[in-house]
């Protein structure tokens, strides 16, 4: 299971949510297509689905701060709609991603930005741990081998699949959201990358350059703790909690989404999160609403 740090006899942590209104979608041929339809608006999904579920299911007494990070040109629109929603009794910070990355939003794709933001936000987090929600528990390197190869390169490591397999055997390999990150370790990882790639250029090296090397925030973090610092077993115990019920489907069939919610999500009383990536075409708002109509007392339309 993931270790939660207890402060003053109370479990406290922070939550980080990077959001961009639109991203490129993947088709079943794994080609990117651009969509600006309201059916694929991440703002609408957040306002109408995600935030309602968070307010219903999260215990805000345990949460120190919620960080919401957005592209510069989308902040005002988000704030205007967000502050009309019910507000929990916890600290919420809405942050311009430029203030974290120093790179103009409009010129850069969303994926790498959001992944690096989830590491850099550690310098603003005051709690010992923070939970990242975005874009999934234990994984195997073969599922996303290119990520492990690319992350090894960015860290200056030789790709070592046998050592990754040992982490898998221990239940300690992580590669996708949601994950709980150790704040100090995430900061140390950023400082490590800064020293390797140069204090003035390292963000550009990770986001704008070296695009042939795939990586995620979690593969970088896992390799850093597992192979460089070699302290991952001290920070994490074997993960046995049913953290995530995820759907990955690159077809254009929205019935897949509706049926997943109807047959798996509605009947699921074990997993803590349901992750449906926003870059799949089937993730339409109408399909989500249609699926949730089969769930009792999960969300109010």
Image (tube, rainbow, N blue to C red):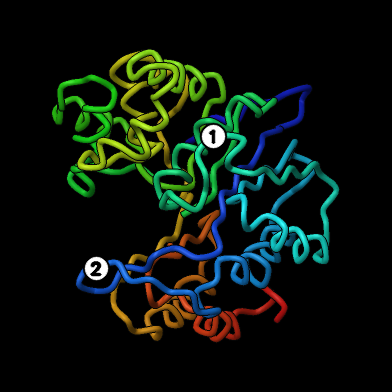
The quarter of the displayed image where residue 128 is located: top right
Residue in view at x 54 percent, y 57 percent: 20
Q: Nearer the viewer, residue 127 or 125?
A: 125
Give the number of marks. Answer: 2
Q: Is residue 259 above or below residue 167?
A: below
Can you identify the residue that label 2 sits on?
31
Q: Residue 224 appears at what percent x and percent y?
A: 35, 22
Q: Nearer the viewer, residue 138 or 77?
A: 77
Q: Residue 116 appears at what percent x and percent y?
A: 45, 37
Q: Are marks 1 and 2 in contact (CB under 8 Å)?
A: no
Q: Nearer the viewer, residue 225 or 294?
A: 225
Can you identify the residue that label 1 sits on?
102
Q: Secondary structure at mark 1?
A: loop
Residue in view at x 38 percent, y 75 percent: 281
Q: Secondary structure at mark 2?
A: loop
Q: Is residue 73 left or right of residue 80?
A: left
Q: Residue 226 appears at what percent x and percent y?
A: 32, 21
Residue in view at x 69 percent, y 61 percent: 78
């Amino acid at each position: 299971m993931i270790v939660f740090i207890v402060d003053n006899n109370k479990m406290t942590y922070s939550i980080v949510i990077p959001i961009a209104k639109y991203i490129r979608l993947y088709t079943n041929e794994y080609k990117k297509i651009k969509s600006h339809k309201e059916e694929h608006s991440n703002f609408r999904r957040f306002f109408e689905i995600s935030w309602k579920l968070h307010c219903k299911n999260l215990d805000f007494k345990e949460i120190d701060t919620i960080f919401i990070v957005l592209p510069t040109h989308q902040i005002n629109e988000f704030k205007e709609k967000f502050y009309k929603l019910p507000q929990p009794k916890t600290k919420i910070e809405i942050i311009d991603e430029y203030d974290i990355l120093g790179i103009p939003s409009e010129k850069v794709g969303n994926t790498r930005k959001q992944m690096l933001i989830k590491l850099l936000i550690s310098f603003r987090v005051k709690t010992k741990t923070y939970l990242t929600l975005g874009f999934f528990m234990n994984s195997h390197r073969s599922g996303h081998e290119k990520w492990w190869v690319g992350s090894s390169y960015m860290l200056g490591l030789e790709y070592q699949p046998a050592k990754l397999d040992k982490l898998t055997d221990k239940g300690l390999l992580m590669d996708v959201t949601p994950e709980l990150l150790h704040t100090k370790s995430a900061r140390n990882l950023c400082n490590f990358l800064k020293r390797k790639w140069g204090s003035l250029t390292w963000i550009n090296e990770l986001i704008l350059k070296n695009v042939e090397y795939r990586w995620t925030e979690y593969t970088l973090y896992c390799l850093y703790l597992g192979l460089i610092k070699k302290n991952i077993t001290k920070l994490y115990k074997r993960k046995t909690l049913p953290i995530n019920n995820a759907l990955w489907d690159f077809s254009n069939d929205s019935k897949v989404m509706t049926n997943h919610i109807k047959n798996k999500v509605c009947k699921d009383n074990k997993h803590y999160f349901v992750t449906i990536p926003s870059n799949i075409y089937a993730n339409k708002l109408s399909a989500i609403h249609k699926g949730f109509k089969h769930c009792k007392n999960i969300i109010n339309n």
